[in-house]
Image (cartoon, helix red, strand yellow):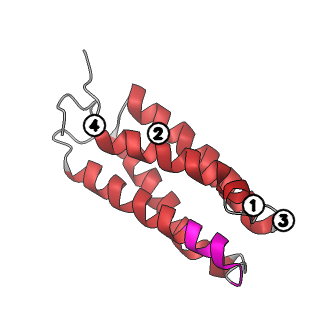
Amino acid sequence: MMTILRWQDWITLVAGIWLLISPWAMGYSGETVALANAVVLGIAIIVYSIVELSIPRDWEEWLMVIAGIWLIISPWVLRFSAQTRATWDSVIVGVVVTLLALWAHSTLTNVGTPRTTNQ
């Protein structure tokens, strides 16, 4: 069965790549906790995005929602909220990932089966 990919999956992949490189691009690579959070979540989002692009399933969208929510709250939970650039980066990427995952989930026609429409 051929699966037609959705644009939300591609943007989420780009968001994951950005999150991975953003500590250096935005100048907060010296903040160890924020750096580790961005690198670990960036890699996770990239991996899950690639999985979504190759074998899309409903549960993958929920993993992205969880990752996005974690990114939104992590500056306060991990106590790097005083690092303005790291906080904004984490929150903005988290909001983007969460909204795209919820949007992609809302377009699924057969929950738990591969997507076959371009939405």
- Gap in angstroms between the C-alphas marked 3 and 2: 27 Å
Question: Are the residues tagged 3 and 2 within 8 Å (C-beta)?
Answer: no
Q: Which residue is mark 1?
A: 35
Query: Upstream in the sequence, badge 3 or badge 2?
Result: 3
| Nearer to us: label 2 or label 1 | 1
In the image, residue 92 lies at what x, y percent?
A: 48, 67
In the image, residue 4 lies at what x, y percent?
A: 25, 26
The residue at 37%/41% (across/down) is: 9
Q: Quadrant of the C terminus?
A: top left
Secondary structure, mark 2, is: helix
Q: Which secondary structure is most common in the magenta stretch?
A: helix
- Gap in angstroms between the C-alphas marked 1 and 3: 7 Å
Residue 3's quadrant in the figure? top left
| Left or right relative to 46: residue 76 | right
Q: Which residue is mark 4?
A: 6
The residue at 64%/81% (across/down) is: 76
Secondary structure, mark 4, is: loop
The residue carrying pointer 2 sits among few (fewer than 14), some (14 to 19) or many (20 or more) residues within 10 Å by Cα, namely: many
Secondary structure, mark 1, is: helix
Height in image: 33 above or below 6? below
- Gap in angstroms between the C-alphas marked 4 and 1: 30 Å
Q: Which residue is mark 2?
A: 49
Q: Is residue 83 magenta?
A: yes
Secondary structure, mark 3, is: loop
Q: Which residue is mark 3?
A: 30
Q: Is residue 107 magenta?
A: no
Q: Which residues are magenta?
A: 82-90
| Nearer to us: label 3 or label 2 | 3
